[in-house]
Image (spheres, grey):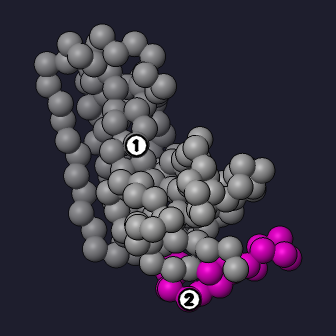
């Protein structure tokens, strides 16, 4: 409902096409260009909506059909960033990415107080861009943020205070240390 508004046309759809590109550790982003070019052709032929499964977002067909194949890369078009509205005891508000699997990278998860959600979103967008461009993270790695915060990379293992977010991809947990 959030992305499409009216679900009647989706309910009445008679077919669905699935575009899958599998790349182990992509050297560039040509696999994404290819997938979006195919989606653009399908929507130009009449498909009215596209579901980006990995980013968990729906896009209107005409918007996908009009995508220029030489448009500049923007990580925010390829991933989604979610800030959960309810804080989890001992964790805070889960803020996480979806879609980094497109780059052969794990998604990112962290928990923050409500007042830090916006800044954390900017940090995750920045880290996501780095990952999309080929950077790899390893458990134990640390980042100094805004001269004050230090984030430490850890495996994302739901349980205890760490919520299960059903990401559909491996993830790293970013801990404020």
Image quadrant in which the N terminus is located: top left
**Is residue 139 something that shows in the picture?**
yes
Choose mark 1 or mark 2, whichever is in front: 2
Helix, strand or loop status at disc 1: loop
* Label 2: element kind: loop
Q: Quadrant of residue 50?
A: top left
Which comes before the other along the chain, label 1 or label 2? 1
Q: Position of residue 26 (x, y in %)?
A: 36, 72
- The answer to whether residue 171 is visible is no
Range of residues picked out in magenta: 134-152
Please give the label number shown on residue 56. 1
Q: Position of residue 99 (x, y in %)?
A: 42, 55
Res 114 label: none
Q: Position of residue 52 (x, y in %)?
A: 36, 42
Tally of numbered discs: 2
Q: Quadrant of the C terminus?
A: bottom right
Q: Residue at x 46, y 59 (%)?
A: 163
Tell which of 161 and 99 is nearer to you: 161
Name the residue located 34 percent from the left edge and 26 percent from the top edge.
Answer: 49
Q: Is residue 103 left or right of residue 123?
A: left
Which residue is identified by label 2? 140
User: Do the residues under discs 1 and 2 have CB atoms within 8 angstroms?
Assistant: no
| Vertical side of 51 occupied by 159: above or below | below
Q: Residue at x 40, y 58 (%)?
A: 164
Q: Is residue 146 magenta?
A: yes
């Amino acid at each position: 409902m959030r992305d499409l508004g009216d679900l009647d046309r989706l309910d009445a759809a008679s077919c669905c096409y699935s575009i899958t590109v599998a790349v182990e550790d992509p050297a560039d982003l040509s696999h994404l260009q290819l997938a979006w070019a195919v989606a653009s052709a399908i929507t130009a032929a009449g498909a009215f909506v596209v579901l980006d499964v990995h980013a968990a977002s729906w896009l209107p067909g005409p918007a996908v059909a009009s995508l220029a194949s030489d448009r500049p890369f923007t990580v925010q078009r390829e991933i989604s960033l979610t800030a959960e509205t309810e804080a989890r005891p001992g964790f805070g508000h889960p803020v996480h990415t979806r879609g980094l699997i497109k780059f052969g990278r794990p998604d990112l998860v962290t928990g923050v107080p409500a007042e830090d959600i916006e800044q954390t979103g900017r940090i995750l967008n920045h880290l996501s861009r780095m990952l999309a461009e080929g950077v790899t993270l390893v458990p134990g790695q640390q980042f100094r943020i805004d001269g004050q915060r230090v984030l430490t990379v850890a495996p994302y293992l739901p349980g205890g205070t760490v919520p299960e977010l059903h990401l559909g991809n491996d993830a790293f947990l970013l801990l404020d240390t």
